[in-house]
Image: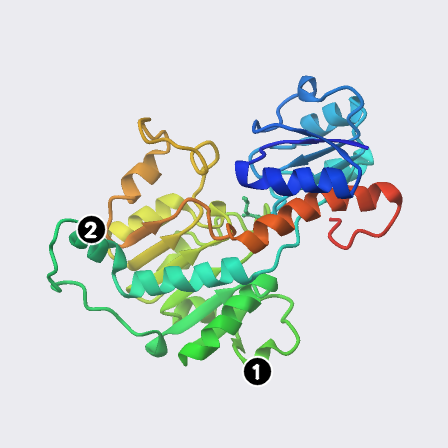
Amino acid sequence: MKIAVFEVREDEKNALHRLEETDKVSLFLTEKPYHSPDQLPPGTEAVSVLGQSPLDAGALAGLKAAGVRWISTRTVGTDHIDLQAAKKLGLRVCNAAYPPNGVADFTVMLMLLALRHYKPALWRQQVNDYSLEGLMGQEMKNQTVGIIGTGRIGAAVIQNLTGFGCRILACDPVPKAGLDALAQYVDLATLLRESTVISVHLPLTQENRHLINRQAIAQMRPGVVLINTARGELMELSALKEGIENQKIGALGMDVFENESGIYHQNRKTDILRNEKMAYLRQFPNVILTQHMAFYTDTNVSSMVDCGIRGILKMASGERCPWEV
Ligand code: COI
C-alpha cells in the first residue's frame, strides 16, 4: 500500500517512519498541502492530509481518477473535506480520534488568561512595568460558564471546570448521558443570556457557520468572555469586532480565526498579514489569539499520525475503522 502524506510537520516524521517499519507501508511524505493529482507518486492508493488541503468535490474527483481509494485527515475536524462528494465517489474517509484533554485544557487556560488580564500583564512585564492598575481580574468560581456542544471536547472542558466551583451551563441537541450531573443543560437562548463565559465546541457545518453573530451577541451579558478553540467560522468576525469595539464583549480567547489558512502554522514574521480583521483585532489587550495550537501536545500528535495511517490500513483491509467518517 502506497500512501501520500501531505502537510507533514517535522515533529510527525519520526512516528511516520516508525509506522513504515512496523506496518510495512510505503509512505511518500511532503510538507506541501495537496492541490493536484500531479503531486501523487505513481501507484498511490491513499492520501493523508491535515487541515490545509481543501478536498472539495473537484479535488476528490481528481483523486479518484488518479486511483486513490482511501483518504485520512489527521485532524478531528472534517470541514475541509466534502464528505458527501466522497461518499458519492466511493472514497472512504477517516479522521483523527485523539483524546480531548489537550484541547480541553487549553480552553480552560484561555478562560483564565482572559479573566486575569494576562495579555496586558505580559506586555508590562516585558518592559519592566510591574504596576497593577487595570489588571484586577475575576475568579472562575464566580462565573457562569456556558459550553455550546458537549461532544468529547465540550464534555472534557466541563469535567475540567468542575474543580473551579463555577456554575456550568451546557447546550447540545443530544445531551451526553451522565453529564447532567456536572452541568445544567439549557436551551441556547438561556445559555447566551445567563453565561459570563461562553465557549463553543462544535464541528463546523453549513448550519452552524456564524452561530455567534450580532443577534447572538446582543442576547449576551455585557462583558461576556468568548472562547473558541473549535473553528473560527463558528463566530462572525465582523460581529466580534463590533462587540470588542463597543465593549459588549469583555474578552475574546481564540485559538482559531476565520480564514486562518495560510497564516497559522507558518512563520509570517516579515510578511504583511492579509487577514485584515486578524491584524486589527490582535492589537486589543483583551483579545488573546493563539495559532491554532490547542491540539498540539505529544499525546495528540502521536495519535494523529497513528489514526491517519492505521485508519487507512484498516479501511483498506476491510477491518472496521472506528474513526471512519
Ligand atoms: C483538528 O484536529 O481538527 C484541529 O483543529 C487541529 C488541526 C488543524 C491540526
Q: Amino acid at mark 1?
A: Ala
User: Where residue 307 sits in the image (x, y, percent)?
Assistant: 69, 48
Residue occupying image coordinates x 30% and y 48%: 242
Q: Secondary structure at mark 2?
A: helix
Relative to the observer, which residue lies in front, 8 or 51?
8
| In the image, residue 111 above or below residue 271 | below
For disc 2, the marked residue is 123
Q: Residues within 10 Å of mark 1 (few under 14, many from 20)?
A: few
User: Where residue 172 sits in the image (x, y, percent)?
Assistant: 58, 66
For disc 1, the marked residue is 181
Q: Secondary structure at mark 1?
A: helix
User: Where residue 205 sits in the image (x, y, percent)?
Assistant: 59, 48
Q: Is residue 221 left or right of residue 79?
A: left
Judged by depth in the image, the label closer to the viewer, 1 or 2, is: 2
Asked whether mark 2 lies closer than 8 Å to ligand 1, one says no
Residue occupying image coordinates x 44% and y 38%: 264
Can the viewer see residue 60? yes
Quarter occupied by the N terminus: top right
Res 71 quadrant in image: top right
Colouring scheme, one of rainbow, by chain, secondary structure, one colour: rainbow
User: Where residue 59 sits in the image (x, y, percent)?
Assistant: 68, 27
| In the image, residue 132 above or below residue 212 | below
Relative to the observer, which residue lies in front, 272 or 225?
272
Q: Residues within 10 Å of mark 2 (few under 14, many from 20)?
A: few
Relative to the observer, which residue lies in front, 123 or 37?
123
| In the image, residue 306 above or below residue 267 | below
| Name of the residue lying farthest toward the right | 318
Q: Amino acid at mark 2?
A: Trp
